[in-house]
Image (cartoon, grey):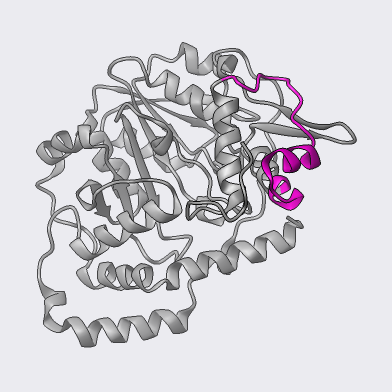
């Protein structure tokens, strides 16, 4: 069926084409190793421009569904059966950090702070609910829905004072008697926090596209902590097949994934990175992120996105804690997001990164 570029739907034509081709690859309609139609051929078949097809192919290559071969075309790289086989290769060296370039504009920050003080007044001195202020939880839920494809209610958002604090909430809620697994190498404080709460933590070696399949198959852990996008310090991004391998691993009863999505906002792709949380349908993936890279390193504010299935457990075991982030900071961040200033900042940094990388 030919699809005109002005057809129904708010999504741009290249995203609609990308999503349809991705689904055809996932369900096997376009098998592993198969050659895709040329960009010109597919453009003619679909009634689209070559540029639109080129853009869709680029996104599929970025995420590991396709590979481009010089003077040969595009070939399907993803296959559902790739899991649980040894991965060969070496770890890529880490790329340079985003650094101060990612800092939120101070002038906008100062203006917003003054406005919040003026409009909210003494309400900023009131105690907020233990999961965080309603304003910020709503703002984050809306942001994730429009930018990351994560559709959740504000009640599923829990606010905390940075990543390390949230790691502690996770192990207290899920239980220290469980075996936790993290990437090797990974952010050192992940294992340190889990162990400090009395839990055992196993480190699983990384291959070129994520945790090695043989290590993942062999582990007896029931909680897997992953950073699918540019894991620190290796800078490795999990391929599309690897992300689904993680989901298949978590299909066994009693298993949980913690998806640490630090730095994904600064992808050079023109489409946000897909998340394991949004791909999973089992309700056993906890998504987490912070604002220390996108706003300021001094802002100790992060959040968990809990699947509905885990809300009662977290409420029972850690719901008695008072929120550890000042109301003022939460409301200021909510204003950043709701005003559009936050996403304008993200787009600006992404454009800068794309210019540097030539993408």
Residue 292 on image: x %, y %: 43, 60
Residue 128 on image: x %, y %: 13, 63
Judge whether 276 appears above or below 248 on screen.
Answer: below
**Observer-nearest residue: 254 or 354?**
354
| Residue 32 part of the magenta segment | yes
Q: Magenta region: which residues?
A: 28-54
Residue 233 seen anywhere in this rendered image of the structure: no
Judge whether 64 appears above or below 78 on screen.
Answer: below
- At 40% across and 38% down in the image, what residue appears? 278
- At 74% across and 52% down in the image, what residue appears? 51
- At 29% across and 49% down in the image, what residue appears? 165
**Observer-nearest residue: 256 or 73?**
73
- At 57% across and 51% down in the image, what residue appears? 271
Residue 157 on image: x %, y %: 25, 50
| Residue 78 part of the magenta segment | no
Residue lying furthest right: 71
Quarter holding the C terminus is bottom right
Residue 218 seen anywhere in this rendered image of the structure: yes
Q: Is 64 left, or right, of 108 in this rendering?
A: right
């Amino acid at each position: 069926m030919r699809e005109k570029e002005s057809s129904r739907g708010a999504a741009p034509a290249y995203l609609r084409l990308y999503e349809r081709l991705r689904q055809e690859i996932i369900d096997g309609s376009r098998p592993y190793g198969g050659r895709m139609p040329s960009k010109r051929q597919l453009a003619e078949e679909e009634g689209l421009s070559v540029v639109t097809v080129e853009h869709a192919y680029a996104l599929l290559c970025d995420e590991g569904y396709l590979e481009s071969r010089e003077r040969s075309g595009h070939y399907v790289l993803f296959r559902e059966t790739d899991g649980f086989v040894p991965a060969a290769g070496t770890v890529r060296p880490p790329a340079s950090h985003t650094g101060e370039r990612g800092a939120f504009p101070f002038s906008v920050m100062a203006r917003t702070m003054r406005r919040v003080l003026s409009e909210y007044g003494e309400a900023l001195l009131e105690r907020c609910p233990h999961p965080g202020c309603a304003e910020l939880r709503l703002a984050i839920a809306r942001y994730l829905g429009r930018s990351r494809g994560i559709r959740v209610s504000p009640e599923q958002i829990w606010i905390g004072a940075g990543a390390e604090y949230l790691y502690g909430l996770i192990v207290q809620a899920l239980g220290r008697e469980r075996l936790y697994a993290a990437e090797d190498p990974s952010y050192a404080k992940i294992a340190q926090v889990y162990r400090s709460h009395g839990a055992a933590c196993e480190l699983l070696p990384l291959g070129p596209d994520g945790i090695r399949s043989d290590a993942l198959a062999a582990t007896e852990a029931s909680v897997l902590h992953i950073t699918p996008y540019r894991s620190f310090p290796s800078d490795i991004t999990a391929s599309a097949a690897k992300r689904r391998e993680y989901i298949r691993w978590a299909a066994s009863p009693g298993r949980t994934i913690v998806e640490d999505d630090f730095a994904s906002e600064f992808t050079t792709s023109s489409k946000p990175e897909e998340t394991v949380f949004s791909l999973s349908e089992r309700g056993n993936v906890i998504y987490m992120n912070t604002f220390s890279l996108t706003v300021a390193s001094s802002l100790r504010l992060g959040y968990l996105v809990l699947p509905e299935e885990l809300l009662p457990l977290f409420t029972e075991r850690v719901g008695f804690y008072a929120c550890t982030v000042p109301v003022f900071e939460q409301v200021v961040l909510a204003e950043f997001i709701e005003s559009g200033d936050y996403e304008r900042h993200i787009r600006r940094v992404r454009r800068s990164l794309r210019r540097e990388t030539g993408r």
